Amino acid sequence: MRALVIDDEEDVRYVAQMSLGRVGGMTVLVAASGEEGLATARRERPDFILLDLMMPGMDGPATLRALRQWPETERIPVVFLTAKTLAFGVDSLKELGAKAVIFKPFDPMTLAADIRTVLQ
Amino acid sequence: MRSPSIVVDEAARLAALDRYAILDTSPEEAFDDVVRLAASICQAPIALISLIDSTRQWFKARVGIAVTETPRESAFCRYALEQNDVLLVPDAFTDDRFARNPLVVGEPYIRFYAGAPLTTPEGLNLGTVCVIDRKPRTLTGEQLDALRVLARQVMVQLELRRMIAERTIAEEEHRRSETRMRSILDNALGSLIATNQQGLIESVNVVAERTFGYSAGELDGRALDTLLEWPAFVSLRDVNLGRMTESVGRKKSGQLFTCEIALFELYAADDQRHFAAHILDVSERHEVERMKRDFITTVSHELRTPLTSICASLGLLASDVMGELSPEARRMVTVAERNSVRLISLVNDILDFDKLQRGTMEMEMQPVSLRRVLEQAVAATNEAALQAGVTVELRETESVALGDSERLVQVATSLLSNAVKYSPRGGIVRIEVMAVGESVEVRIEDRGSGIAPELQARLFRRFERADSSDARTKPGTGLGLSISKAIVERHGGTIGVDSREGEGSTFWFRLRAVGDYRQFLTDRAGASS
């Protein structure tokens, strides 16, 4: 399974990459911004995208909308990753077309399994 | 004719003289007229209005004499003070009292004297209206009467003066007191607005003008209701009397501000009811409170991102997926991981607490299986129970309550992890679900050391712990129970503890059955509208 992690925080990107890769056995691509993530997604067509909600420039919801504009990324499932618990309700994020919302801090040992469950 | 002497209370007499405030005043026509008339009627060269203080006789008006005062000892008039009628001295040479008087043997060579006393309403003699001649003589009956009448007229003048003087003093005092009151009102921190019983404004202080942006003139007669976003004044005036309530004020510019209002009744000397509102602009204070809360929220959120990296890194290290660690290194990493998890739960508690305070915690109410809620709580505390050597027994009872399942899991987990934390090694924690009337009660019973009665009520308050030394030995924020209480109360339920020292504690929460909860919502909607 190929994952794309889009997060502006390098440390979060790295631990997510290790959690999904070393613990979950996935192939993990990373991108540091919404713009970069969109380009990577269109080129690599990952099986799902773990997308940070709050990012400078193109934020999570904007990136999600952009992904939906392109035929090659239109159907890729997106899971939001967020530290915020107030700004957006889970429901409004799901209405944007997200498959699930995972809150920081996540459990590195179960992150991959949790995502596999919601993707099924 | 010698009138009988009267007893003189000299102190009272001097005090009375003082009250008329006449001594050493300038000549006045009304008094000058009297002495001219006296001289003319009595055919005398000298006529005086003489007032006697402790040392002298002083002339308010005089005819035929230049001096304005003479020493008291030589004054004929001091003898007149002891009379209640005219003192008549036909020939001073033949009167023992006056034969050697300097005014008789020298200037102005007095031989004849007639003085009618100036008697106050309380019977004190202040002085005389007198006529003097340089030859012995007497007065006719008409002249004596005229002298008495003139003395009475002088008293009328003096009385009038006194009344005017007293009124002026009273008015001055009143003005001073009004200025003082005004200054208190105008320097008060809040707006003070006085109204009639319909709530129409009668007067305001300067703060009210400043706060609402209207002049006192513009506010006069205006309805208090137009300054406040509240139900009508008449519906509130008796209900809210003497109570502080929060409302929203409206300035002339249309700008709204949060304010606190205290209404009270004023007592005026009429048969109308009058009210006053004390209105304090608290928008600034509210703004500071809001900023403080926002700051807490922001910091708590900002902490989550670095904590995510720390926690996940340590978790990955501890699990050996990043390569095998030496036993010592793994133990270190485990310590670090456990403490970063504690930090996260503190941040989560603060955020939850903040949400509950703001009323922004969303609850998704639906029928919830309590068995599933409790199973999740047991699973969440499983590892802690294993490590503490505590057995958790869940007695299976299928029960449905209306609630937010995630939040109920949070409450059950919080209570269960407390029970595990405070159980002795090898202890048992029992979880029971029972129906109590229409409600459903979850009971979590431990065999810990129990909680003293005086501590039980305090437990559910913020940051309270049963024993402050626990803070060092048992992890936790002290927020868990207060959050649980708030969540349960948002469900319309109750939470509590039954405990005996040395015998353990049973923490319980009771939720409304489905129908009952709907009633709670209806009641709450009714109460807040």
Image (cartoon, rainbow, N blue to C red):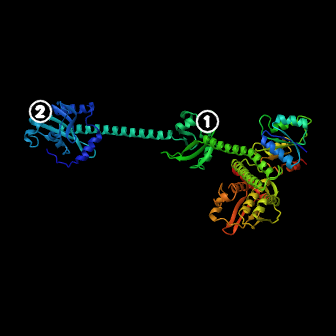
Residue plotted at (71% across, 46% down) = B300
Marks 1 and 2, how far apart in space?
82 Å
Foreground: B169 or B87?
B169
Of the numbered discs in the image, which one, if any, rests on residue B6?
Answer: none
Which numbered disc, 1 or 2, marks the residue that appears first in the sequence? 2
- On screen, residue B172 versus residue B491, left or right, reads left
Kindly state the secondary structure of the residue where label 1 is placed: loop
Tell me residue B81's x, y (percent).
19, 43
Q: Nearer the viewer, residue B285 or B275?
A: B285
Instruction: Please indicate, yes or no, whether residue B518 appears anywhere in the rendered image.
Output: no
SS for dot 2: loop
Residue tagged 1: B251
1 and 2 marks in contact (CB < 8 Å): no
> Type of residue at label 1?
Lys
Q: Residues within 10 Å of mark 1 (few under 14, many from 20)?
A: some
Quadrant for residue B255, please give it.
top right
Residue found farthest to the right: A71
Residue beneath label 2, please? B107
Q: Residue furthest front?
A: B326
Q: Are marks 1 and 2 on the same chain?
A: yes
